[in-house]
Image (cartoon, rainbow, N blue to C red):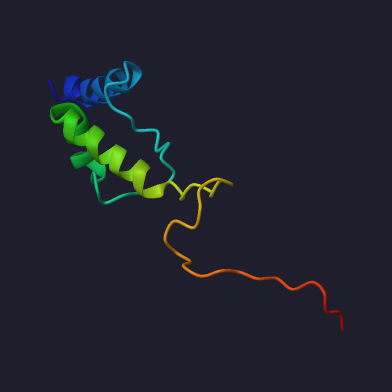
């Protein structure tokens, strides 16, 4: 009986990962406290998948850099004056 448990639990976890029901690969590259780690993270993946996916999406949104400004964006309220560059004077 104990042997079945010792072999059964790792096999069960392997099958869950094989069929992509849980992700133990650590592909996010960093540990996050938003969705927990260890057994609580696995518990959220299996028993509360919506919470787990929301936490992963929060991690993705928090780690994305700000987009680069485009030519037609304007100053976005940062600068209210006028820039004048005088190129007629030389040192």
Q: Tell which of 31 and 57 is nearer to you.
A: 57
Q: Tell which of 54 and 7 is nearer to you.
A: 54
Q: Residue furthest bottom?
A: 91
Q: Is residue 88 above or below residue 1?
A: below
Count up the numbered dots: 0
Q: Residue at x 49, y 58 (%)?
A: 75
Q: Tell which of 29 and 54 is nearer to you.
A: 54
Q: Tell which of 57 and 38 is nearer to you.
A: 57
Which image quadrant for residue 40?
top left
Q: Residue furthest right?
A: 91
Residue 28 in the image: x percent, y percent? 41, 40
Q: Residue at x 59, y 47 (%)?
A: 71
With 16 as the anchor, is 78 left or right in this view?
right
Residue 84 in the image: x percent, y percent? 65, 71
Residue 22 in the image: x percent, y percent? 28, 27
Q: Quadrant of the C terminus?
A: bottom right
With 28 as the anchor, is 87 left or right in this view?
right
Residue 8 in the image: x percent, y percent? 21, 20
Which image quadrant for residue 29?
top left
Q: Residue at x 13, y 28 (%)?
A: 47
Q: Is residue 35 above or below residue 22?
A: below
With 17 as the anchor, is 66 left or right in this view?
right
Q: Is residue 23 above or below residue 83?
A: above
With 68 as the anchor, is 43 left or right in this view?
left
Q: Quadrant of the N terminus?
A: top left
């Amino acid at each position: 009986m104990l042997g079945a448990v010792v072999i059964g639990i790792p096999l069960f976890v392997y099958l869950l990962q094989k069929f992509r029901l849980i992700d133990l690969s650590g592909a996010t590259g960093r540990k996050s406290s938003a969705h927990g780690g260890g057994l609580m993270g696995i518990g959220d993946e299996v028993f509360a998948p919506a919470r787990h996916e929301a936490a992963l999406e929060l991690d993705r949104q928090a780690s994305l850099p700000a987009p680069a400004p485009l030519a037609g964006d304007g100053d976005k309220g940062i600068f209210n004056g006028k820039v004048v560059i005088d190129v007629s004077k030389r040192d």
